[in-house]
Amino acid sequence: MRYEAYIRNKRLGRARILLWLSPGLFVSSLAGLAVPRVAAETRAPLVITFAAGRGPWELRTDMGLTLESRVYPFAHAASLQRVWRATLAGDAADYRALESSGIFESLSPDLPVNSDTVVPSEPYFTTDGTDSTKQWWSSKLRIPEAWELSKGSRDTVVAIVDTGINGRHEELNDGRVGSGYITYCQVENPIGGQCLVHISASISANENSDDNGHGTLVAGLIGAIPNNGKGIAGVNWNVRLMPIKTLNSNGAGVSSDVAAGIVWATDNGASIINLSLGGNSLEGNTVLTNALSYAFDHSVLVVAAAGNDAALVGSDLDINPVYPVCDDAGRNLVLGVAAVDINDRKAGFSNYGRSCIDLSAPGVTLFNTDKDQKGMLSTYFDPARPTNNSVYAFASGTSIAAPLVSGIAALLKSLHPDLSGAALRDRIIGSTDNIDSANPDNCQGISCTGRLGSGRINALKALEARNLTSDSLIKDSSGRIFLIENGLKRPVSDFVFGQRGYSSASIKNVAATEIETIPQGSAVAPLDGTLVKGENTPTVYTVSNGILLPASYLSFVSNGFNFSTVVTVPDSEIPGYTIGPNLVPGNGALMRASGTPAVYFMHEGKKRLISYFSFLNRGLKWEDVVPVGSEEFDRYRIDPTVTLEPPLDGTLLRGDKDTTIYLVQDGQLRSLSLSKFEQMKFQFSQVNIIPESELQGYPHGEAVL
Ligand SMILES: [Ca+2]
Ligand SMILES: [Ca+2]
């Protein structure tokens, strides 16, 4: 079993464990990036107010004053428009000279205040969540506000199971990269692929253990040093990063090494393990599942990337699972992370799926097409320049999304050291922002609702959320009842309360103000199989896997439902539930577009035209044909395999312009030779003559031999 890390990079070569990074990896030292650097000199931040009638045109370069931005760009009052942020080069003497110039009404230093948003002064940091040239994701995910609650802690250890970490990088070299472990195949036999030299060894703190770059990218996102005037700021100001090198210089490895890395990290104090890696053929890989269970049972949170799809549309993990992101073993062992862009749209490359993805996080700045995408900046180790410890790279991939989640989990762990891995997981899942409206058709043409997890991660909500035990029932002062599940409050209606057999004795009273701080999820659905409708609306829904599927009349009757069993609830209740796709009509359902005579026969949700001959031959009844509106009619696609529904098996047919006789077998017309016809003891009186064009419309098979 092989792994590749989940960065879609230029070395996406070998093997099946993918580093989920984007192809257009752009590597550069900061000096090489086309973004202005902060000047080397010290500049003091000021707030200045021009005197009435004075203005920027009076500034001379020898004053050393640089205007940065208006403090009140939204204000109309002239007195407010004269207020600017500025920086001043040089010392206090310059400051006094400015004061006496008469140009300014006031000058004052721009000082930090308590409980203000924490903003590092890094060249690539920004508080603008739309600035795609910088570290936009930080404010998008409300990380600076979360820093007011916690900036992280050196007691929180995040293990990065990957290609190693460059602990000498200028953004990681202050002691935050602790000791770790190497377990991987260093030399593989090129023929046959068996490992010739396998290394198991410890990694010393503050050393470089990366020979690929991927692990260092991940590390910087979680914990690049803030406020050092260099590069970026990681999600955590303070954190311990544990290098676990299980992938070789190509970013490839095997599941046993990944498992060993997970267990080593668990045994050596990791609270969170980041896995920006995975593989396709790992279903049922016991060693990996066992390691994940081990970590889970030791209260470690494992975060895994969804994986990148080479076709750049995203693979549906419900159909094509990859591991470890899908390795939940029925108890959600792994926090699965899909990738979105600056606009919360699913990144084209990101896999998705209801069962494997728990939430989403930024993994690319912009993804428009394969050719038009923009990565996100992090620290990097460039194997071509191994002694350069100030390399940065723009990268994209689900490899980038996972560490942002790991980083926020580390902030949360630092704030609440007692939270278990499962509790961290539930709070993070339960405090996302809904991104359904940004993804109406981004999952291979259909809505991503439910396929990108609970939404896009929000650091502030995760850190603010109240501690409530999962599966508890709470009630507010107005009597509304909620079920707490995965950190979400899910409304419970009177009907559902009774139907699911909840007990009033188990309800806890919670103040409405506290309940408001808990993110709301969808309402707890009626039991599967329930038929439900609003009292004044016609649509009937059937509940399947906790989701309400709208049933048209055609779907309703063709699935054998009975109107007497439909439960009526207040109309206001319906929108609170998760509403799924339309219920597919049952096989054999008959319909026609209103006002037209052509009858269609439904098969596996697709429609097949049925001829008058087949209609009679199958003993169908006109009163069973349901007229449907054009919207519903168009909703069902023509079955590309069978455009014209054939007569019953055993029917004999020939066209009116040819003598060949056909026998219908397995839904296909198979020609019969005369000898075969006689051998099978058929009579010519049994042969039905139909128009040649109709005959050609039916599916044809091999001749009967
Ligand atoms: Ca920095
Ligand atoms: Ca999961």
Image: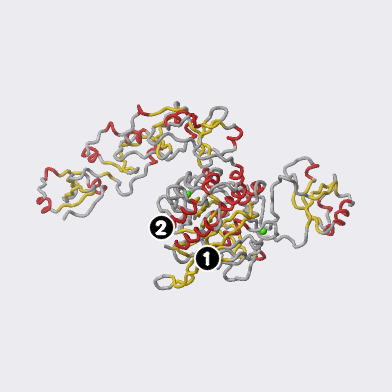
Specify the label residue 182 is tagged with.
1
Judge whether 611 appears above or below 312 on screen.
Answer: above
Residue 424, x across and y down, in percent: 55, 47
Q: Which secondary structure, mark 2?
A: loop
**Amino acid type, residue under disc 2 in the picture:** Asn
Residue 203, x across and y down, in percent: 57, 66
- Counting labels gives 2
- Earlier in the chain: of badge 1 and badge 2, it is 1
Give yes or no for contact between labels 1 and 2 (Cβ–Cβ under 8 Å). no
Q: Which secondary structure, mark 1?
A: strand
Q: Ligand 1 is located in which of the four quadrants?
A: bottom right
Query: Which residue was labeled with disc 2?
Result: 285
Residue 282, x across and y down, in percent: 41, 58
Q: Residues within 10 Å of mark 2 (few under 14, many from 20)?
A: some
Evaluate whether residue 21 shows in this view.
no
**What residue is at 53 percent from the left and 55 percent from the top?**
273
Instruction: Specify whether 504 is left or right of 511.
Output: left
**What residue is at 42 percent from the left and 62 percent from the top?**
1
Name which quarter of the figure residue 525 lies in: top left
Instruction: Specify whether 436 is left or right of 144.
Output: left
**Viewer-proximal residue among 396 and 387:** 387
Residue 103, x across and y down, in percent: 86, 50
**Viewer-proximal residue among 606 and 563:** 563
